[in-house]
């Protein structure tokens, strides 16, 4: 039978999860507002997304809610950046003057 962890261990996990997850929000907002993901490395985001999916799976297997929640939300944010990279790819090739605000 596994030992019960002190409450602060999960609290530490939730705080860490919040910090690493919220760090993706400015990137998503920036890409959305600019309607461009120019400068965002597609390969890096693909590898990162795969890693996040693996962390999510690991958390699910351990039934660790801080890992599951953080990586579930982070996975959605990373996938959003990848989707916008694909969606806005034509806009990145047009000159700035022809883009509508």
Image (cartoon, rainbow, N blue to C red):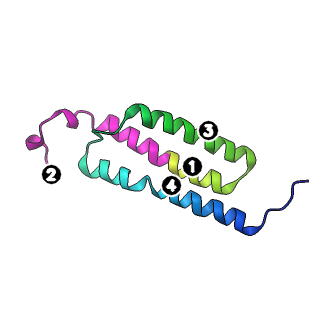
Instruction: Mark 4 or mark 1: name the one nearer the start of the chain.
Output: 4
Residue designated by label 4: 21
Query: Dot 4, crowdedness within 10 Å: few (<14), some or many (≥20)?
Result: some
Instruction: Mark 2 or mark 4: name the one nearer the start of the chain.
Output: 4
User: Residue 36 at what x, y percent from top left?
Assistant: 26, 42
User: Residue 46 at what x, y percent from top left?
Assistant: 46, 33
Name the residue located 73 percent from the left edge and 44 percent from the top edge: 61
Examine the image and state in which quarter residue 42 appears. Answer: top left
Q: Mark 4 and mark 3: span between their CA atoms?
A: 15 Å
Query: Dot 1, crowdedness within 10 Å: few (<14), some or many (≥20)?
Result: some
> In the figure, is residue 56 to the left or right of 99?
right
Name the residue located 13 percent from the left edge and 43 percent from the top edge: 99
Foreground tag (2 vs 4): 4
Q: Mark 2 and mark 1: span between their CA atoms?
A: 32 Å
Query: Dot 3, crowdedness within 10 Å: few (<14), some or many (≥20)?
Result: some
Q: Mark 4 and mark 1: span between their CA atoms?
A: 9 Å
Q: Are marks 2 and 4 in contact (CB under 8 Å)?
A: no
Name the residue located 83 percent from the left edge and 62 percent from the top edge: 4
Q: Are marks 4 and 3 in contact (CB under 8 Å)?
A: no
Residue designated by label 3: 54
Can you say whether 69 is above or below 12 in the image?
Answer: above
Residue designated by label 2: 101
Q: Hey, which residue is sitting farthest right in the picture?
A: 1
Instruction: Mark 1 or mark 3: name the one nearer the start of the chain.
Output: 3
Instruction: Mark 4 or mark 3: name the one nearer the start of the chain.
Output: 4
Q: Are marks 2 and 1 in contact (CB under 8 Å)?
A: no
Front residue of 72 and 26: 26
Foreground tag (1 vs 3): 3
Foreground tag (3 vs 2): 3
């Amino acid at each position: 039978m596994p030992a019960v962890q002190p409450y602060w261990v999960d609290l530490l996990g939730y705080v860490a999860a919040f910090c690493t997850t919220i760090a993706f929000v400015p990137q998503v907002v920036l890409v959305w507002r600019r309607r461009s993901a120019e400068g965002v490395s597609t390969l890096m985001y693909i590898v990162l997304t795969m890693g996040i999916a693996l962390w999510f799976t690991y958390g699910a297997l351990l039934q660790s809610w801080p890992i599951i929640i953080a990586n579930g939300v982070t996975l959605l944010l990373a996938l959003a950046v990848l989707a916008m990279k694909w969606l806005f790819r034509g806009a990145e090739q047009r000159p700035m003057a022809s883009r509508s605000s």
